């Protein structure tokens, strides 16, 4: 592999980077096409405001468990087949969604299509295979930042396509066209990438079904860290329940809660099956890793990506409600927020490579904490320019923080990179669910203050407990050969 990262090259690892961030970009175009298409769908099918909101909730519900499952699958089968499968299957489900006629059909298809949002996890493993530790931060930052821009790509292009057809089915054509492009790219991707550079080994977990841990305390922490994922899905169910949006019956609500409890019990059992041996025979030192590293990065992504999704969802309304800006102006000002991803996330990764992962995270979380506590003190008398500047500043720090988190994820345990990325990614969605739920219950200033407070708690965890990856990690080949992977 060439040493320097030349983004204008289309050879070797840089070629894989470009092909993979665009695969991620296409999954986000398909997954997040719902937001910009919603006004068209609502008008064409005469949906109520409540029905539209439910579709948006269903769109993210499946993504939480999907990121965990896809993390396991990518570690076992490799990113090449997984990314292609997600693009092709996701594209097909999206096409079916776009031609449904009843609200119930739309809701079911939108719930199923939430798994497309798990594509992000696949590329984390692919990039970690192709880039050395000294470049993994900037490479993961470019992958995450540019791929995330798929949401903006959908927002910019799909309404124009829908409007150009000029009839009530315009939204159907727009989503179908985007989905066909995703399917075609899924096929192209499969035939143009490999899981590793020539001569490198793709390390797989020794057992599947749950993450391998190193000792009994890590096993307990791993089980506890799964609870917030189920609580987030319970919160989404409550949002749809008779007590809230009244979109599902009491019996359905109780059934979902029961299913969640049963799945959690099954997961704990599977986790025990995979890890029970560590209580009798200690894991060899060279294969150990500290699960607290994973847990802290999970909570860190809970803040950074959770903030990103929540803020981008409410920012335009905040500008309109508090500062009485025209809707178009508010939308344009809020539209700046996703653009920050193009440079802030790669910037966070680059700084991590250059100055250290932990230090970059400390700086990023200090910035998130201060920015959002400042926004928590905003009142309607403030200058709109100062408020827009503060929201952009908070966005820069949170997106740089996301880049720094995924600069570190691949350096914890190579064979488990997909599962670690999947868990962190799922926590990002949990953060979005929590922050958006809070946003629906409190005023904007309290919403911002909560983000600042949670960010401060995570900052303390980072300062006290997070360890900078140093030295090397070891993996054992099938023939027993030990391979050493440098971390810095």
Image: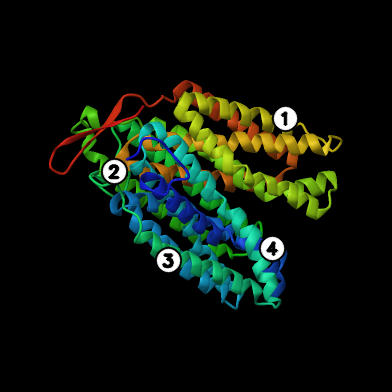
User: Which residue is labeled 2 in the image?
Assistant: 272
- Taking depth in this image into account, of 475 and 282 the one nearest to the observer is 475
Q: Which numbered disc, 3 or 4, marks the residue closer to the eye?
A: 3
Q: CA distance from mark 4 to mark 2?
A: 42 Å
Q: CA distance from mark 1 to mark 2?
A: 45 Å
Chain-order first, disc 4 or disc 2 = 4
Q: CA distance from mark 3 to mark 2?
A: 34 Å
Chain-order first, disc 1 or disc 4 = 4
**At 69% across and 40% down in the image, what residue appears?**
447
Q: Is residue 464 left or right of residue 76?
A: right
Q: Is residue 440 visible?
A: no
Graded by Cα atoms within 10 Å as few (under 14), some (14 to 19) or many (20 or more), the crowding at tag 1 reads: some
Chain-order first, disc 3 or disc 1 = 3
Quadrant housing the C terminus: top left
Graded by Cα atoms within 10 Å as few (under 14), some (14 to 19) or many (20 or more), the crowding at tag 3 reads: many
Q: Secondary structure at mark 3?
A: helix
Q: Is residue 196 left or right of residue 480?
A: right
Q: Which of the labelled discs sits on residue 374, or is there none?
A: 1
């Amino acid at each position: 592999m060439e040493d320097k990262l030349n983004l204008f090259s289309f050879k070797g690892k840089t070629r894989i980077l470009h092909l993979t961030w665009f695969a991620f970009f296409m999954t986000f175009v398909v997954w997040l096409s719902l937001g910009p298409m919603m006004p068209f769908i609502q008008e064409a099918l005469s949906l109520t405001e409540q029905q539209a909101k439910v579709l948006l909730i269903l769109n993210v519900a499946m993504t939480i468990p999907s990121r965990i499952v896809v993390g396991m699958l990518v570690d076992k089968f490799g990113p090449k087949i997984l990314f292609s499968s997600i693009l092709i299957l996701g594209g097909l489900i999206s096409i079916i969604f776009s031609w449904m006629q009843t609200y119930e059909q739309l809701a079911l298809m939108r719930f199923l299509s939430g798994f497309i949002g798990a594509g992000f996890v696949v590329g984390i493993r692919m990039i970690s295979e192709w880039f050395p530790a000294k470049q993994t931060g900037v490479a993961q930052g470019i992958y995450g930042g540019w791929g995330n821009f798929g949401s903006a790509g959908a927002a910019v292009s799909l309404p124009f396509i829908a409007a150009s057809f000029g009839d009530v089915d315009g939204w159907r054509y727009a989503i179908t066209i985007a989905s066909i492009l995703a399917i075609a790219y899924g096929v192209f991707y499969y035939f143009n990438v490999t899981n590793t550079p020539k001569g490198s080994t793709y390390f797989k977990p020794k057992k599947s079904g749950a993450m391998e841990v190193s000792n009994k305390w890590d096993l307990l922490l791993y089980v506890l860290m799964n609870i917030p994922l189920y609580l987030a899905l319970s919160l989404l169910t409550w949002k749809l329940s008779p007590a809230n949006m009244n979109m599902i019956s009491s019996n359905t609500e109780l059934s979902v809660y029961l299913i969640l409890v049963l799945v959690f019990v099954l997961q704990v059992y599977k986790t025990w099956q995979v890890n029970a041996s560590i209580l009798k025979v200690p894991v060899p030192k060279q294969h150990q890793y500290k699960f607290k590293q994973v847990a802290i990065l999970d909570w860190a992504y809970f803040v950074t990506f959770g903030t990103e999704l929540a803020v981008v969802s409410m920012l335009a309304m905040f500008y309109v409600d508090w500062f009485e800006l025209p809707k178009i102006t508010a939308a344009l000002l809020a539209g700046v927020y996703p653009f920050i991803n193009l440079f802030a996330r790669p910037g966070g990764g680059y700084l991590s490579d250059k100055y250290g992962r932990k230090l970059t995270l400390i700086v990023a979380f200090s910035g998130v904490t201060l920015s959002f506590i400042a926004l928590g003190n905003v009142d309607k008398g403030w200058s709109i320019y100062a408020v827009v500047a503060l929201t952009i500043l908070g966005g820069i720090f949170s997106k740089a923080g996301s880049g720094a988190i995924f600069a570190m994820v691949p350096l914890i345990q190579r064979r488990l990179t997909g599962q670690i990325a999947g868990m962190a990614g799922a926590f990002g969605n949990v953060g979005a669910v929590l922050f958006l739920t809070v946003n629906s219950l409190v005023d904007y200033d309290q919403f911002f203050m909560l983000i600042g407070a949670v960010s401060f708690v995570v900052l303390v965890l980072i300062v006290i407990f997070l360890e900078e990856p140093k030295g090397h990690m070891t993996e054992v080949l099938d023939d027993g050969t030990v391979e050493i992977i440098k971390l810095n």
